[in-house]
Image (cartoon, helix red, strand yellow):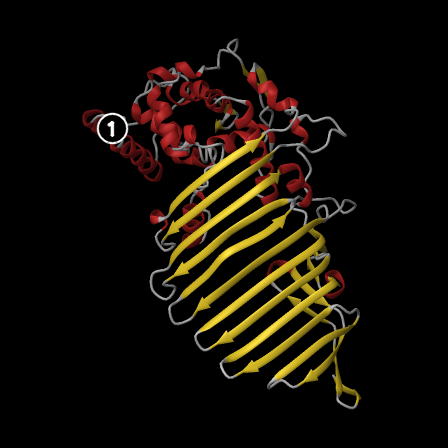
Amino acid sequence: MVAATWLGHVRLAVRAAELTGPAGIRINSPATAWDMAGNFGDDLRLTLVEPQAGLSVRKRVDPVGSAWTVEARELDVGQLLGVRRDARPLLDGGIADSHLDVRTSPDALRVHADVGLRGTRLAALADTAADEPQLGDPTDLTLRFDGAWQRAGGAIDIPEIHGTVAGAAVSGSIALRDLDTDPVVDLTLGVQRLDFGQLLGASGLAVPESLGMMPGSGRDLGSATIELRVHGHPMDPASLLVSQKIDFRPPRQMPPAITRLRGEFVYGAETGPGPHRPIDVSPASPDFIPLHDVPPLFVRTLLLAEDAGFYGHRGIDLRELPAALLTDWSRGGAARGASTITQQLAKNLFLSRDKQLGRKLQELAITFLLESALAKDRILEIYLNIIEWGPDLHGLRPAARRYFGREPQALTPAEMAFLVAIIPGPIKYQSSFAHGAPGPGLRSLIDDLLAKLRSVDAIGEEDYRRALAEPLVIGGDTATG
């Protein structure tokens, strides 16, 4: 509705609106009133007057293009914008002090952004009961950058990005070239003082009770500094060159459940239905295998398949992440992952099996704790003794006995490749060898692993050909292979 208020002034009244999106997402805005000056052709000014002041929009036209300016001062974003998914809030925008300039011309679009939000609350990333808070702790967000999109050359440049989120300082740059032909990306990202306790709080997540931290002891889970650079062709994930540098400052007091892993402990596996036997991770257990008794070829096979950079990273391997994400996107699903062995151990020891983003943040925090408290060999030793290899089947020694009726030291290269190949889906793959031999799909995975071992000279040509020809017989504890 348009109404003339007095000579030379026009007020716009806009009805309340709701935008319905996929997955139950709804964006609501209340009825608003704007004072308008100028006209839509040359110089237009809109100033918000109801339900609050603090927001203005201006459009200017000149011979080479147009420019839009949006400015917010002490604007309560929550009064203007509600974002929900079904009945759950996704955002409380807080108080905005922001400035945005967008200038367009025939050959380019240029953007200057200086965004500041105080007391913003983001959607909780955990499943919460109806009477629990559904938004994370209030946090301040800032973002500043200047960027340009050159239409003719198919290039986007954002030479400097600066921001803050959950107390961490973020900086970086983005350059995209040849967008119309074969895109090339050059991205840098730096995160300083990433406090994991504060990050979990802003995400509406609790410190996992499984860490054994006393109530009232705070959320000190340590902090990290991360530097990342990505360069290459996104259309060819294998071409991406990724470098990373990660430093972690451990908490003043390590959680008790982490420190106990330095010695003997009992692990209570809770995967799948039915009762589960506790796993005694100690030399006194007949099922325990110390790392020095694990065949070196098995370790090599495991690392090639699950975490090639295990001994060189600090718990997470960002070098694998861009290629994993692009491969998943191009195939339309979760075709591959980028979880390190330490991340898998963090999930198995302390977290549920759900695939929520919130669990991944908790997993990240625990991963850094594990890497800070334990040596690499100890992490690998625990992993080999507790991970799942089938229904209520945990640890390398029981798995070797169950499937091949022998000790791990007596396994053949093909049998080792089989055990490693089923790690990502030990329950899912059960039907693939239900008749005593791997099906074609699983056998292909085994042969691919053997080819990798040959490519790095972990096995010789004769052993490789013998392993390819070996008929794998998978049975119970009496199997002879």
Position above or below: 192 against 435: below
Q: What residue is shown with label 1?
A: 457
Position above or below: 78 against 347: below
Residue 382 vs residue 414, the one in the foreground: 382
Q: Secondary structure at mark 1?
A: loop
Left or right: 166 as drawn, with respect to 412:
right
Position above or below: 405 against 144: above
Q: Position of residue 460 (x, y in %)?
A: 21, 25
Q: Position of residue 319 (x, y in %)?
A: 42, 41
Left or right: 39 as drawn, with respect to 132:
left
Q: Position of residue 393 (x, y in %)?
A: 49, 24
Circle 1: is it few (<14), some (14-19), or many (20+) Cα within 10 Å? few
Q: Position of residue 276 (x, y in %)?
A: 58, 23
Residue lying furthest top: 284
Q: Name the residue rendered at 74%, 63% in the picture.
A: 75
How many badges with numbers are in the image? 1
Residue 311 vs residue 473, the one in the foreground: 311
| Quadrant in the rendering for residue 297 | top left
Q: Name the residue rendered at 37%, 68% in the picture.
A: 153
Image quarter hosting the C terminus: top left
| Quadrant in the rendering for residue 178 | bottom left
| Quadrant in the rendering for residue 364 | top right
Residue lying furthest bottom: 7
Q: Is residue 272 visible?
A: no
Q: Amino acid at mark 1?
A: Asp
Q: Name the residue rendered at 65%, 66% in the picture.
A: 20
Q: Is residue 248 visible?
A: yes
Image quarter hosting the N terminus: bottom right
